[in-house]
Amino acid sequence: MVEIDSVQAYCLMGPPGAGKTTQMQCLASALPYSARLSVGALLRDAAADGRLGAKQTQEINDGIFIADELFLALFSDSLFAKLRCSLDRNLETAVLLIEGMPRTEKQVCWLDDNLEYWRLILLEAPDEVLRQRLMRRRSAQQGTYRLTSSRTYVPVRECRADDRPSVIERRLRKYRQDVYHLLAAMDRQKIVVDATLPPTDVTHVIISSIARAQT
């Protein structure tokens, strides 16, 4: 059990291209005492720095989920480090933002067992909108830089491997077949948001919902 019982955690989920990373950045700016943990960035960094083997790295590039046991070990290490470093001085109003989790029953159970309070924020959008967004992201990535978990910038010489058209279709299919049904059936309070709205409107809906939950 996480010892910091007063921390409120919000898990931001949705299909690829729903705008999870954009909303995480907006929420982190809007919520003064917050820590942010991105599952996608965590896995890509773990693959880049050798914490994952060749098989797991290829799975990530192909849009396939790695085994829960390995993922949860990486995630828990990063989560507790984030809690210790970012939230220890502002516990009464602390908010933990988790992007890209849960995706499986085991991950839901881990959250239930280790976090005193967590809620799901579910972004929803039609697949055609998601495809268009992902292809635009693929084009925009070339010639840019990304910030790693070690706070250094590295050049993005190639587009994200999981933004290839064939992988996009696999990721959308996997989400619709497995993840969406898991999240929709969860017996837990959810914040469901129309992700086709302008990003600022999506952020407003989420922040308003969080404010209501905190009262």
Image (tube, grey):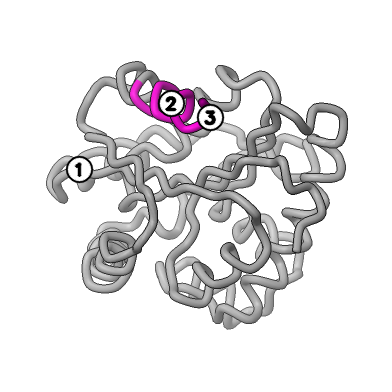
Marked residue nearer the N-terminal end (3 or 1): 1
| Position above or below: 134 against 116 | above
Residue density around tag 1, few if under 14, some if 14–19, many if 20 or more, within 10 Å: some
Q: Which residue is mark 2?
A: 212
Q: CA distance from mark 1 to mark 2?
A: 24 Å
Residue at coordinates 47% horizontally, 30% vertically from top-left? 210
Q: Are marks 2 and 3 in contact (CB under 8 Å)?
A: yes
Q: Amino acid at mark 2?
A: Arg
According to the image, label 1 marks what residue? 125
Q: Residue furthest front?
A: 215
Span colored in magenta: 205-215
At label 1, the amino acid type is Ala
Identify the residue at image location x=41%, y=59%.
Answer: 162
Q: Are marks 1 and 2 in contact (CB under 8 Å)?
A: no
How far apart are the alpha carbons under marks 2 and 3? 5 Å
Q: Secondary structure at mark 1?
A: loop
Name the residue that disc number 3 marks. 214
Of the numbered discs 1 and 2, the one sitting upstream in the chain is 1
Q: Is residue 96 left or right of residue 78?
A: left
Give 199 or 184, whichever is nearer the viewer: 184
